Image (cartoon, rainbow, N blue to C red):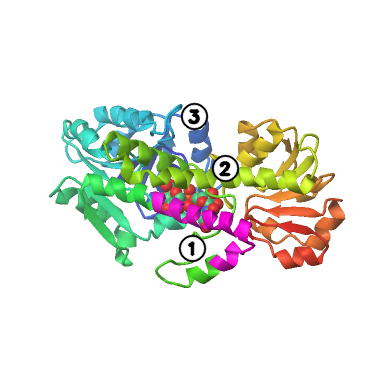
Amino acid sequence: MRISVIGCGYLGAVHAACMAELGHDVIGVDVDQAKIDALSEGRAPFFEPGLPELLKTEHGRLRFTTDISEVSRARVHFVAVGTPQLEGSNAADMRFVDASIDALLPHIGPGHLVVGKSTVPVGTAARLAEKVEATGAELAWNPEFLREGFAVSDTLTPDRLVYGVRRGDDRASDVLDEVYRRPLSTGTPRIVTDYATAELVKVSANAFLATKISFINAMAEIAEVTGADVTTLADAIGHDVRIGRRFLNAGVGFGGGCLPKDLRAFQARAEELGVGHALAFLDDVDQVNLRRRRRVVELVAEELSSELSGAVVAVLGLAFKPDSDDVRDSPALDIASQLALRGVTVQATDPEAIPTAQARVPALDYRVNTKAAVDGADILILLTEWREFRELDPAEVATWTTARTIIDGRNCLDASEWRAHGWTYRGLGR
Ligand code: UGA
């Protein structure tokens, strides 16, 4: 099929490459010339495992351009632009979605299907459908559930496909079935529903995941005043299949370009709809999450038992999670910034996210690797559980630094092993 993908960020670039991998003829469009140049040369503009390989192998069926008029050859148009948090508000900034639809309108007509992938406030698809249908084209909303770091496999083998269509619009779902023929042939569940349900599936899934993480982080707060161990608690409750162990890792909490802003935009939309009370608990979910970041700053102060100002802290990890260079609303970068604001010299390192972090927070002392980051530090804090940090050898690290205290913000190290090598180990909720 001939497909266009509008927006070539973390979502769109992966979607475009995966659609080509599924056998389609794809044109990716973005207003950012540098991004388009990189993608056209087969280079990924951000770190995502598996994407560079796809960009190279799919070169023949996959093109990128800044010229929106090139989409007219395609019949299916995916809108995959960002919906960040609006400055000074909790609501989603819809300007990129609106601009993309407006830019598409002159190039679509009968026989075209526009497919929204962006995460949007419920009611958006119904609003945009009027404009799209005025050209004779149709609109569907097909939310994306990919996780950064696993984006390629999540797109090629999704755990479910959700199509939000106009009631009774069989053509739109037939077209999407054709697009996703390969994953459907392996039994991927497919749910066809109305626009509002499809939009809500996406935001409620992210709200649920955020709630699960904040639940365990709230238990970490209780564990801290009772001497309990939140990791053992998570293991024990996780054996109940109704609860499940995944997304019960206590630590510095959730960040990224999705969970935090989706949580807030969902509340803002509920308030607009007059049912803000239904989601009032999500404010607590947000607050628990932010408190964990402050807790790490307190722990550093406690462990140093002196003024924070003038201290040297080694920060291991800047990305919001491992296998990503994304630092949007990253707990790690937030904690590093809070420490720097309090006069700490922050020697920060990350396997992939130094350039993205540096662009946002230039004031940190960025170091090329762990050895350089811990050199001369008073204390170490691990904030993103990259494999190379999880596998650090406490004996070896001790030869790189005179510091003997580590705060494990992801509860990912073996506490007894670090203690056995003479380290003071502090986890969160342990
Ligand atoms: C999230 C959802 O998991 C995807 O399903 C969704 O498609 C995506 O948002 C989106 O809306 O686009 P992502 O932001 O890539 O995916 O990251 P997650 O794996 O969900 O992790 C989010 C944050 O929660 C990270 O900062 C991670 O470190 C943290 N986390 C995760 C925890 O603190 N504890 C856990 O147990 C799990």
Question: Does 275 appear above or below 396?
Answer: above
Mark 2 CB in 8 Å range of ligand 1?
yes
Task: Give the residue number, with chain letter if any, for mark 2.
Answer: 330
Position of residue 59 measured from the top left corner of the image (x, y, whole percent): 46, 47
Q: What residue did someone put label 1 on?
A: 246
View extreme (front): residue: 226
Q: Quadrant of the C terminus?
A: bottom right
Give residue 107's position: percent from left, percent from top.
26, 30
- Identify the element where label 3 is drawn: helix
The reply to whether discs 2 and 1 touch (Cβ–Cβ < 8 Å) is no
Amino acid type of disc 2?
A: Ser
SS for tag 1?
Answer: loop
Name the residue at 29% across, 31% down.
Answer: 101
Q: Is residue 107 left or right of residue 420?
A: left
Q: Quadrant of residue 223?
A: bottom right
Nearest the eye: 414 or 361: 414
The residue that label 3 is drawn on is: 33
- Please state the horizontal and vertical placement of residue 297, each as a whole percent of the image: 67, 43
Q: Is residue 226 magenta?
A: yes
Crowding around mark 3 (Cα neighbors within 10 Å: few <14, some 14 to 19, many 20+) is few
2 vs 3, front mark: 2
